[in-house]
Every structure is written in C-alpha cells, then in structure tokens.
Image: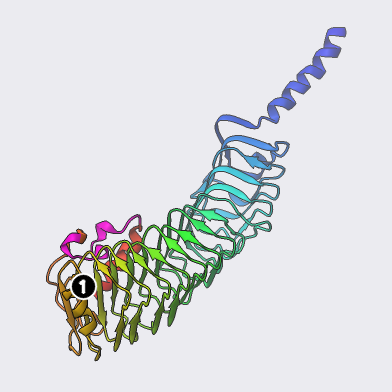
Amino acid sequence: MVVIKYLLPALAAANLALAADCGGDGTIKISSQGDADGYSSCKKLKGDVEIDGKARDTITLNGVKEIEGSFKAESATNLTELSAPSLESIGDKFELDGLTILSKLSMGSLTSVGSIKWQALPNLQTLDFGKSVSKADKVEITNTALTNLDGISLDNIGDLTITENRYLKSVNLDGLTKSTGLINFAGNLNSLEVELPKLISGSNMTFRNVSNVSVPSLHNLTGQLGFWGDGFKIFSAPNLTESSDLTFIGNKEARNISMPKLEYVNGGFHISKNDKLKSVEFPELKKVTGAVDFSGKFDEASLPSLDTVKGGFNMQSTGNFSCEPFKKMNKNQVIHGKFKCVGETKNPKTKSGESGTSDSSGTSTGSSSSSTSSGAAVVDNVANMPAMGMAAIFGYLLQYAM
C-alpha cells in the first residue's frame, strides 16, 4: 500500500508531463481547437507548427509566446479565424496559403518573424496585429483582400513583394530605413499609394500599377529603380544621388520626374511612353555607365552636368527641343557609344527600335545587348533586371507589347 501511495502521484505527474509536451524535432500538427488547447501550458513550442488542412472554424493558440521553427497553415479551406494572442515571435517562416474563407488573423503580441509568405487569402481584409511586426527578413503577400498593411511596421527588410492584392489602397512603412533585397509592387489596386518616408538606402525597387510612390529620404540604391504603367503625375526623389538602372516606361499620367541631386547611374537610364511628360531635366547627373535612352513627347531636355556616358545615347521626341548640347557632348567624346538625337519626329523610337510613345506601336529592330560598351541600355535586357520577380518582368514586357 505504501508503494501504491507514492506510485500513483508519480504516474499522474508523468502523464501531465506527456500532456504538456512542447514539441521537439518533429512537426506539431493541429487539426482542431482541442489539439491547440493541448499546448496552452507551453510558453515555447520547439520545432515547426502546422495547422492541418482539416482544421475548421476558429483555431486559437493560447498561452504560447514563442514558436522556434515555422508556423504554417495550408489548404485549410474551412478555417475562418486564426489567432494566437500571446505569440511574440516566430523563429522561421510564417506561411499561410489557400485559406480561402479566412477572414480574421489576430496576433496582437507578434513583433518578430523570420519571414512572411501569405498567398491566396481572398477574404482576409484586415490584420489584427496590435504591436505590429517590426522584424522580418522577407515579406511576400499575394492575392489577399487586404486594404492596407497596418500591423506590419518594419525597420529593415530583405525582399518585400506585394502583388495581386486587388483591394490594397495604401501601404505606409513609416519605420523602414533600409532594404537589402527587392521591393516589388505589382498588380495591386491601381489607386494604391506607397509611402516609404524614412527609407534611406536600398537595392532593387520596382513599381507597377501604383498611383503614388513617396521616397523623400531615399539617398542611394545599389540596384535598379523601375516604374511601369503607374498612375502618378509627379515622382520625386529629392535626395537620391545614385542608383543602378533607372527605368520609367508607360507612366501615362506622369508630368514631372524630379531627381535634382542625382549624380550617378551605374547602368542604363531609360525613359519612354510617358506621353504627358514635357520635360526631362537632371541638373546634377554626371555619369551613366550604361546608355541614356529617352524617347517620348517632351519639349525640353537638359543634362548640363553630364560628362560621361559609357554606353550609347538615344534621344528622340515629337517635341521641339534642341539637340545641339548633346551633339557637342558627342563631339567631345562624352558619349562612348552610338549617338542619335532627333526632335520633332512623328515616330520617336527607343534605342532598341520600339515606339517611344503609347499611341504608336512602332517596330522592333532587334534586341539590345547587355554590354554597356556596345552602347545598349542595360535595362533593355530582361536578363539584366536583377531579382525583379516574374510579376515585374511581365510588367516590363507588357509595356513593350502595347
């Protein structure tokens, strides 16, 4: 009897320990609220956590503050709400895919994740992230019903990919100061406004189908800055001094492109099919290592500080501007590649032979080389668009097909 007296409590304690297993090397799978409740005494879950496709209605992960691995939910087509009120960090990936009726995502304490990848969430309209996610290496959000990204407020980011969110009206990342990968916006609501007020440095940035891009603090980019089919009237980067390839194609409402401090383009500089743009003026631009390729309907063209163009130079417009300053540059060997400058032409062409305006299809005369020494603009070669992503590449090709 004495043995039983001490054995029973020991067995009960062992059962409790088993019930409170907080994971290990394997994946914790949750198919029901009962499964989730089994981990409510765990402050930390080791390994990965996966919401099973069989999960339905509401799943709430109570008590858990940290997931060491990934947190995933895929093809749970009957799941309407997912919440984790105490969760503060996810060590690896936070992935949601194919949750077609999910309408509420609530994680009021979450501030840190390894990366975010959400796709095919057509009923998710808002994020209930009270403290906001401030740390993530990569963020990819595709095909949701989100109207804004409130609840995501990053300090630094690698890749930021926001595509095919047809209700997205505004993105304001007011804490973001640095990006080391690709920032890509494409295929969202046409009236989308993107504000990056404190972004100082970045790598590649591409924008398609946005109505406004605000980068007042941007100083330098190691990669390209590209705009395709955007609806803004004015683009201003008042503090930008250097970039790799610069591209403005098919922004039909653009009336002003202002980069008053731009000095150095490490690649090609391409402007075409911006039919309301009447002036191309870059007063401090000194060096372009690729080609200068401007075509359209502008009446003024001014590059007074330009002293080196390692590629070719193509400037063609329907407008009445003077080619004399550029002919002088060519004569003085400022321009190392092939030179062409034509004003008052009915059919202005890009360097590759495409139409320089949106209301004339033009005829291609062949693809351009990627070599700056040949005079070709680097941005005319899709292979030279570093890490743009398929959506951005498609946008680039579509503009030339129009």
Q: Which residue carries the number 1 mark?
A: 313
In this rendering, does residue 386 appear at all?
Answer: yes
Instruction: Give amino acid for label 1.
Output: Phe
Give left or right: position of 83 versus 94: right
Q: Position of residue 94 (x, y in %)?
A: 54, 48
Residue 284: x and y in percent read 38, 74
Coordinates of residue 239 in the picture (x, y in percent): 48, 70
Instruction: Please provide percent x and percent y for residue 243.
Output: 38, 63
Q: Tell me which residue sits at (62%, 44%) in the image.
A: 32
The magenta stretch is 373-387
Residue at 14 percent of width and 76 percent of height: 363
Asked whether the viewer can see residue 51, the reply is no
Split into 4 quadrants, where in the image is the C terminus? Answer: bottom left
Quadrant where the N terminus is found in the figure: top right
Let me know if residue 132 is in the magenta part: no
Along the line of sight, the residue nearer the viewer: 154 or 351: 351
Would you place residue 180 above or below residue 15 in this image?
below
Q: Is residue 347 left or right of residue 51?
A: left
Task: Look at 26% across and 67% down and name the residue there.
Answer: 308
- The crowding category of the residue bearing disc 1, from other C-alpha atoms within 10 Å (few below 14, some 14 to 19, many at least 20), is many
